[in-house]
Amino acid sequence: MQASSAPAPAPARTPETQRPVAVTGIQSSGRPHLGNHLGMIRPALALAGRHEVFYFIADAHALTTQRDGEAMRRHTHELAATWLALGVDPRRMTLYRQSDVPEVFELTWVLACHTGKGLLNRAHAYKAASSANHAAGRPADHGINAGAFAYPLLMAADILALGAEVVPVGRDQKQHVEIAREVAAAFNAVHGPLLVSPKVLIDQRVAIIPGLDGRKMSKSHGNTLPVFAEVDELRTLVARIVTDSRPPEAPKDPDTCRLFALYRHLAQPAAVSAMRARYLEGGVSYREVKEELVGLLEAGFGPARIAYRALLADPAELDRVLAAGAERARGRAAPLIERIRDAVGLGAGKTGAAGGLHGGGRGAHPGMGTAGT
Ligand code: TRP
């Protein structure tokens, strides 16, 4: 059953533009926050132009934890409106709902059958869940559904189905992209170089956005600043940021101040330098910095919040945008999935029943030979 493999194809770039593909997704489970924006959405949007970009709402990933179908659809719309309000232009970029691209699920299964279970045992999220069980004296897999275990495979399929070369993510997703590379390598070692190995792209300046309590900003820590909160809510949340008790005139350390850590990501560079100097000299009150921070959030996100509200008011239009995006994503994924089905022997194959003269029923399609193991 061994055949020689075809030469490695160049990464499959879009024919019209020859631009490399970038893809990234966000799980639809709650209101997007400043950490999502600075850590992932903003760097992902910056790739548009030089890259052919695909952004999606990872509802199937959210299904590993969400049990309320209504809420799932609502969160999907909220996230779609967020992407659009923050700058996705559907004429130049592709925005879609993961579950509208069935090719992804098909690829997940094929990848699952080529991936060692041990690779998934080592995934951080699964390890954290099972060690929490261990610490609590419960069986290792207590309460962990098989979807949560397979989470990295679905994510690998999201990326590999589009032949993406670049995956902009926050630092917490780095291992998942590395798993996608390993999965691609394992598949290619058997069937030839059909899958492109993706590179992770992490914006180092914003790799970790501190939350209100100084820990990483995260829904699970309940310390987030939602990007589209109304100004009153922002003011209340910013007021909660804990500082030390130095009086206004005292010199302060910008590098240990949680407030400054957020300010630095939102203000213009010149304002950041000026604020740093005022910290070191003394003469600035934390209250003043908090007010400035609220002002920056309002100036930065106020207009997008208005757009967001308008977008959310028309869910049918959001669904139209998502459906058009899914068409494009499927258009890109389908030919690759067809080649993969051919290579592994699912379906009748390219040459159908009449094929089968070469390699035990596999069509003679280039790039589908086995490399042997
Ligand atoms: N796991 C990612 C997160 O929680 C979301 C995600 C799903 C994703 N599939 C992806 C990100 C593919 C990048 C590429 O943030």
Image: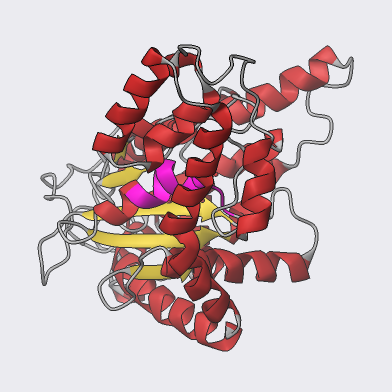
Asked if residue 37 is among those painted magenta in the image, a careful observer would answer: yes
- Residue 199: name its quadrant: top left
Quarter of the view holding residue 325: bottom left
Residue 30 seen by the camera: no
Q: Nearer the viewer, residue 347 or 19?
A: 19
Rendered image coloring scheme = secondary structure
Left or right: 205 as drawn, with respect to 156: left
Judge whether residue 66 is colored magenta. no
User: Is residue 20 toward the left or the right of residue 194 in the image?
Assistant: left
Q: Residue visible at 14% across and 59% down?
A: 19
Q: Position of residue 232 (x, y in %)?
A: 67, 56
Q: Residue at x 62, y 40 (%)?
A: 238
| Position of residue 350 in the picture relative to residue 158 (left or right) | left
Measured from the top left, where is residue 134 in percent x and y?
81, 15
**Nearer to us in this view, 75 or 56:** 75
Residue 114 in percent (x, y) is at 46, 39
Name the side, left or right, on which 68 lies relative to 109.
right
Foreground of the two, 160 or 252 = 252
Question: In this orientation, which residue lies closer to the viewer: 57 or 245?
Answer: 245
Q: Which residue is rendered at x = 40% and y = 60% of the image?
A: 55
Q: Main secondary structure of the magenta part?
A: helix
Range of the magenta residues?
A: 32-42
Task: Check the picture and name the quadrant holding the N terminus.
Answer: top left
* Quadrant housing residue 214: top right
In the image, residue 250 sits, relative to residue 330, either above or below, namely above
Q: Position of residue 5 (x, y in %)?
A: 18, 43
Task: Identify the residue at image location x=40%, y=51%.
Answer: 41
Can you see residue 72? yes
